[in-house]
Image (cartoon, rainbow, N blue to C red):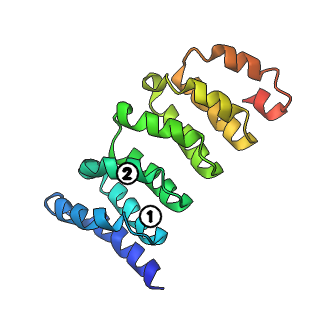
Amino acid sequence: GLETWGKALMHSLAQISLPEQSNKLISQLAPLSQSDRPVVSAAALEALGDLGPQSVPVVPTLLEKTLAPNREVRLAAYQALTRVTRQSRTVVPALTAGIQDEDQEIRIYATEQIGKFGREAQGPAEPLLFAVLDDSEVRKSALDTLRQIRTEALPLLITALDHEDALVRLF
């Protein structure tokens, strides 16, 4: 319906906008990201993510929306945040919180994204301990991430070798 059309329009505008047009587009998308309608808010957040680093001025909004009650809005906010900025001081703490989200897809996404920060993400090792104990999909992502960030997590990885779940021992 109309919401699907609006979502497609926001994505298209973000993808074809010229750099000199991005400020105007951001100023129009930012209020939409605050919509009470989750589909509108999520679509605006996704479009802001499509603009990449040009959307840096709205990082505070993206961070705020990672705490939204709606899972689609939270996921769109996390995805936009990682596409807009790679500044570890900003993104890693938000992703660390995402590891503890109630939604499995968000926990997996946050865990995988932390690994992309390498050694800059050494701080999140402790929350990853909890993710390792969660369901098998999150455990695999968490163990992969711990390998990527190469922290003091070696004792955790050794402990995982004794885990009751064979899939954990394989990863």
Q: Is residue 71 above or below residue 138?
A: below
Residue situated furthest right in the rendering: 164
In the image, is 85 to the left or to the right of 165? left
Find residue 166 and report its image quarter.
top right
Residue 80 in view here: no
- Which residue is painted at 72% across and 30% down in the image? 171
Kindly identify the residue that appears in the image at 72 percent across and 38 percent down: 134
Place of residue 3 in the rendered image (x, y in percent of width and height, measured from the top left): 45, 79
Q: Which residue is mark 2?
A: 62
Residue at the spot of label 1: 42
Residue 124 lies, in percent from the top left, at: 53, 27
| Residue type indicated by callout 2 | Leu
Amino acid found under the numbered disc labelled 1: Ala
Residue name at image x 52 percent, y 24 percent: 149
Say if residue 21 shows up in the picture. yes
Q: Earlier in the sequence, mark 1 or mark 2?
A: 1
Q: CA distance from mark 1 to mark 2?
A: 11 Å
